[in-house]
Image (cartoon, rainbow, N blue to C red):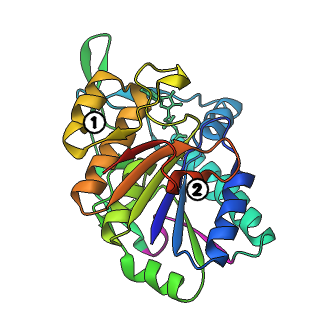
Amino acid sequence: MIIVKVGGSEGIDYDAVCDDIAQLVSAGQRLILVHGGSSLTNEVSEALGHPPQFITSPSGYTSRLTDKRTLEIFQMVYCGQMNKGIVERLQMRGVNAIGLSGMDGRLWQGKRKKAIKAIENGRTRVIRDNYTGTVDEVNCGLLETLLDAGYVPVLTPPAISLEGEGINVDGDRASAATAAALKASDLLILSNIPGVLSNFPDESSLVRTINLSDIDDASENFAEGRMRIKLLGAKEAIEAGVQRVVIGDARGANPISRALAGEGTVIS
Ligand code: ADP
């Protein structure tokens, strides 16, 4: 079983991702796809007059400020155009994909953080109109039922809170929780970069391997912004028993097969 997370940044080739999935699934690979939608969400937010805002937590992680209106826009884009666009691409290739958000069937459940802290100009600010959280529980039964029946699940945030509200969760960490819960062999985190770069954005500075014990140092030394969350997700997955995490490139042909062959940053 492999979990493939494909980001939502510019440059990602979803047709190539879906071609590769069609090949792997027809060869018998059990696979779940998790996707993002950040760049389209930014565009739609601007168009709807509610521009995106990003915050940095006291521990240095960057995330989207998700008030109620942002959550609505997030659902339009992630559960709507992004999810259904990928399902359509897979269906056109003969893959019986089924698109679900983490809310459906309580697939990804977690606590809503009703107040979060953000660092702004060196000061801490508390934000209360907040719909974010983390995935604490994965509905493995639902995913296994779908996989056993021959469907390919295509999953997307938001997740669901204990009270039943939608919550924005990080896609990389949700993928890590899914990989851990289903005891996947591999978690492939694909984005618009070759992997972890020691000298970002110089693409020739790819870090080929990172051991579990060195993840924190790598995060501290070279990763900024969103890459730090990918490394945190990788660490959580490996600690929970996933054998290998590959942070790889989704910009060219056969991105999943290439990551499976070890192209990118291999973390184990
Ligand atoms: P996605 O939405 O596709 O998952 P993210 O925006 O979450 O992608 O994360 C990938 C981004 O991380 C890259 O586009 C890059 O801007 C940023 N990044 C920061 N530091 C690094 C680094 N050391 N190596 C690679 N990417 C990095």
Q: Which residues are magenta?
A: 96-105
Tell us which disc is closer to us: 2 or 1.
Answer: 2
Question: Residue 51 colored magenta?
Answer: no
- Name the quarter where the N terminus is drawn: bottom left
Q: Position of residue 215 (x, y in %)?
A: 26, 38
The part of the image, by quadrant, that contains residue 45 is: top right
For the residues marked 2 and 1, what is the alpha-carbon distance in whole angstroms?
35 Å
Q: Amino acid at mark 1?
A: Ile
Q: Secondary structure at mark 1?
A: strand
Circle 1 Cα neighbour tier, 10 Å, few/some/many (<14 / 14–19 / ≥20): some
Q: Amino acid at mark 2?
A: Ile
Q: Name the N-terminal-most of marks 2 and 1.
A: 1
Can you name the residue that lies furthest to the bottom here? Answer: 149
Q: Secondary structure at mark 2?
A: helix
Residue at left offset 66%, top offset 29%: 46
Q: Is residue 96 above or below residue 113?
A: below
Question: Residue 98 colored magenta?
Answer: yes
Residue at left offset 45%, top offset 39%: 67
Q: Is residue 149 above or below residue 153?
A: below
Q: Nearer the viewer, residue 29 or 123?
A: 29
The residue identified by callout 1 is: 116
Q: Is residue 140 left or right of residue 150?
A: left
The part of the image, by quadrant, that contains residue 160 is: bottom left
Q: Is residue 83 visible?
A: yes
Residue at left offset 54%, top offset 25%: 203
Q: Nearer the viewer, residue 189 or 38?
A: 189
The residue identified by callout 2 is: 256
